[in-house]
Amino acid sequence: MSESKPESGPVPNPRVTWEGCSVLLDINDGDRLVFARLSAGSTLKIGNKTFSLKPLIGCPFGSLFQVESGKEKPYLSRFVPPTEENNVQDEGSCQLQEESRDNRAIIDNNQAQSLTGEDIEAMRRQGATGDEIVEALVANSATFEKKTQFSQEKYRLKKQKKYAPRVLLRRPFSRSICEAYFKKYPARIGFLRVDALSLLLSMANVTANSDVLVVDMVGGLVTGAVAERLGGTGSVCSTYLGGTPYPIEIIRMFNFSNEICKRILRCTFNDLCSVQNETGEQVNQHEDVCAMESQSNEKTSLSVSTEDVHLSSKNGDTDLVPENELSTSSKTCKAPKAGEKATKEVIQSWKENGFSSLIVAAPEQDAWSLVKDLLPLLTYSAPFAIYHQYLQPLATCMHNLQHEKMAIGLQISEPWLREYQVLPSRTHPCMQMSGTGGYILSGLELETWQFFTGKELQAMARQEIFRSCNILLHSQPQDLTIFRARKTMGVPSRQLSSKTQTAEPQAEEPPSPTSSTSSSQHQNEVAEEVGPSKVDKPTTPSASSNS
């Protein structure tokens, strides 16, 4: 593997943000999910207001921020929710049974609120906070006291999201990244849900010090999840067909260290299969070509990721300002590069030892055409897991694996997930949920045995491939069948011919009357070694008397 020098300076605390790290911003309790890279010039736009992300640097993950109205411009300030709020909710839930109010008499004619938009803007210019504006709206509402407790909480939450939005600072890891992409851009990750991703890693038995072969066509999500579980041990080989690698730009959001990035390598499928036939010059030329391809792919992935963060939603909200990615401060805090070209020594080690597991997430490719070529690269009894959005490609692959006897323990699993809303006296399943999370085909790779016929064994013996199997030249066809069965069960061939190694030069000579005694003894030894079979009796009188 390529050795890159680690960056100088202290190792950042993974629980606290630092300049240049990637974060996941959860706005208004999941209404929007935004990926950002923290720097002094990075900004975030909520509605028609732009806020600087500099206050987020140095804060622990899980911190909550709220928009405050400053004298010059609004800013994000650290917000700590009061502990008395939970007690008030519990007390209010206990009193719900006694109240008999409902919303049947309330008419929504937009005349209940006496506070106008101009009054709210005047409060903002005077420096009023978002919470003060919400309390003013509640006080000037004519129907607020007539609403039920649930309706009042919904009203407060709606106004709080509009006038005092909150931003939760989340650490990007496998689950949070998968949930964010599945909610916003599910097609880019092949509709891979978080429960399917966890089941994919478990069925492939991804553990520490493993060498995992990955076919990742979902943006690098599976490759990053495998590298995160390995934790800097083992290696991840992201293979691809053809000359252009598959984009893995999602790996940059994991905040991997240099040690983990070194474990993520790329290699073409042709290199894995033909590494022994390549010369040094060919390998160097191939590495140069792949380096140029990786550079071009990095440029395209950077442009794609820049488009991702600048897309606008239907509500008119944008994610990040373009100056964020192109500022000079962000260049100094560049993330470590992952997915370098694997060296010839590493590829040779993979070819000799085999990969410990295989994960395939390629919705655009045929599952069987990939698996039949990738399974021989695995070690003995290695597990594999194949993900696909639809069932039929996996069913076809499972049938072919059974027919070719290439795997055992085959099963197709469909993960099922239901999300619940958990609130006092309002715990129920969510109204909207995903219909399916895809399908996973799993099993164990089976090493196939190679059987030889009698003619093939005789041909190999004549070519001196099996020097110790010369007894096969004087044996009957049924004896060859017995030898084939014992050879398949793991009996070494040298144990079958240990007594006849001295008779090797005379194996091809025809029997003569002077050497009939030695020929008879040799045939008796053949019958004793191979098993009970018919051996031609000697015809000369001297051989019969000696026997």
Image: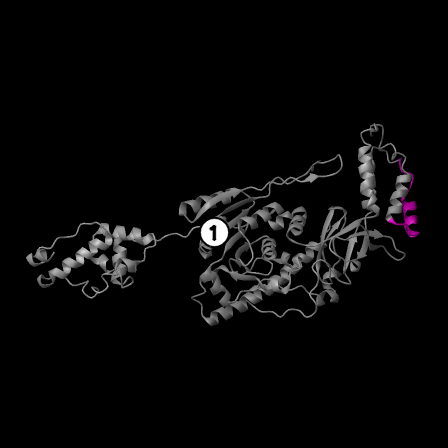
Q: Is residue 118 magenta?
A: yes
Residue 154: tell me if it is visible.
no
Assign a secondary structure to mark 1: helix
Quadrant where the N terminus is found in the figure: bottom right
The correct choice, above or below, for 541 with respect to 441 in the image is below
Residue 396 at x, y = what percent? 47, 44
Segment colored magenta: 112-129
Q: How is the image coloured?
A: one colour
For label 1, the crowd category at 10 Å Cα-Cα, with few meaning under 14, some 14 to 19 and many 20 or more, is some
Residue at the (12%, 53%) spot, across then down: 537
Residue 489 at x, y = what percent? 34, 52
Report the side of 419 relative to 147 (left or right). Answer: left
Residue 448: tell me if it is visible.
yes
The correct choice, above or below, for 326 with respect to 139 in the image is below
Q: How many marks?
A: 1
The correct choice, above or below, for 8 with respect to 521 in the image is below
Give the labeled residue for mark 1.
Answer: 371
Residue at the (70%, 63%) spot, across then down: 12
Residue 20 at x, y = what percent? 72, 62
Report the side of 525 relative to 54 (left or right). Answer: left
Quadrant where the C terminus is found in the figure: bottom left
Looking at the rendered structure, the kind of residue marked 1 is: Val
The correct choice, above or below, for 540 with respect to 430 in the image is below
Q: Please name whichever residue, 150 or 310, is drawn nearer the observer in this view of the structure.
A: 150
Report the side of 481 relative to 132 (left or right). Answer: left
Residue 3 at x, y = what percent? 58, 69
Report the side of 410 relative to 111 (left or right). Answer: left
Residue at the (22%, 65%) spot, across then down: 502
